[in-house]
Structures are given as structure tokens and as C-alpha cells.
Amino acid sequence: MGRRCGEIALYAGVAGGAESILIPEIEPDFDQIVSKIEKGIKRGKLHSIIVVAEGAYPIMDLKETLEKRTGQDTRITILGHTQRGGTPTAVDRILASWMGKAAVDAILDGHRNMMIAGVDEKIHAIPLGEVVKGTRTLDLNMLEIARMLSI
């Protein structure tokens, strides 16, 4: 997930405390990634987490590059659809309830081919034609937050 937009990987990386996050919008800086791994090792860290958005970089090439440059064993875990699972939080349940209501309201109002979405803290029905027109622009401010937290 995230072949052309790294938003899911970016937010998952921040939430999970990743040292580095690779997304399609930004060319990876291997010197920076290696530096973070080496600094962590010097501080006694036993592992580093690197989140890679699907399609952002060839994962096996990344593994080989990091092993070569750090001398550390590198393991890959591909979450795939596993990331969609888990027990919903109270916020998840409330959001789903609001979105379900909006979907029913849209149907009752005669709307079809709509996507229910949260935009600016409000629930909206958006025509699918608008949804598939283009890609969403990622807020790169979150990437700066990720960099600050991973020091």
C-alpha cells in the first residue's frame, strides 16, 4: 500500500517509532539512514526500524545496501494486509459510526458512486469520479516530525 503516496507509511513510521521512513515522494538518503543506525548501535540499541512504503524502493536492494554499509544483520517483514487488522479503538468505532451514517444518508438522498471520507474533521460524500482523478498530496511536515523524533 502506498505505491504512489507514502502517507500510510509515514504515519505508521511516526506512530511506531521508526528511525527512517522511505516514501515515494522523497529520494532515500542512505548516508542518513546508515548514520542513524550507527548512532543507535553506539547508544546500545539492538535494532532499528525502517518503514518502506510499497514501491518506494526495492526492499531486497535496501537490505543488501544496509547490510553492506553497516555490517548488521537485516531482516525484512512485509506487513501486507496484516496492517489492516487489529482491534479497533474507541475512536475507530466512533469514526466508523459517523461514516456509516453518512453512507446511509447519501443513499437515502439518492447519491450513488460516492466515497465517504473525513476531510477537515468533517465527514463528506465525495463522487468517485473526483477520487480517481489524481493523487493526494502528502503533507511533508509530518516527515520533519518523523526526522526529529528519530534522533
Image (cartoon, helix red, strand yellow):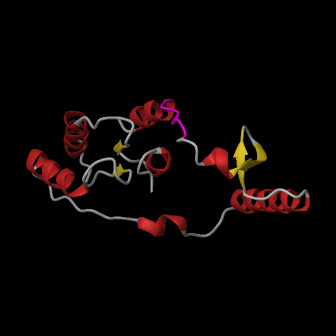
Q: Is residue 137 magenta?
A: yes
Please report the bounds of the magenta region as a residue range: 136-140
Q: Look at the picture and state if 77 lies above or below 144.
A: below
Q: Residue at x 69, y 59 (%)?
A: 92
Q: Residue at x 21, y 38 (%)?
A: 30
**Residue closer to the observer: 72 or 79:** 79
Quadrant where the N terminus lies?
bottom left
Quadrant where the C terminus lies?
top left
On screen, residue 71 versus residue 45, left or right, reads left
Q: Look at the picture and state if 82 lies above or below 43.
A: below
Q: Is residue 122 magenta?
A: no
Q: Look at the picture and state if 89 lies above or below 149.
A: below
**Based on the displayed image, in which of its 4 quarters is residue 79 positioned?**
bottom left
On screen, residue 145 versus residue 130, left or right, reads left
Q: Picture coordinates of residue 80 (x, y %)? A: 42, 66
Q: Picture coordinates of residue 60 (x, y %)? A: 20, 58
**Residue closer to the observer: 42 or 93:** 93
Q: Picture coordinates of residue 111 (x, y %)? A: 83, 56
**Based on the displayed image, in which of its 4 quarters is residue 116 positioned?**
bottom right
Q: Picture coordinates of residue 15 (x, y %)? A: 50, 49
**Based on the displayed image, in which of its 4 quarters is residue 76 positioned?**
bottom left
Q: Main secondary structure of the magenta part?
A: loop
Work out which residue is located at the far right of the displayed protein and give it.
109
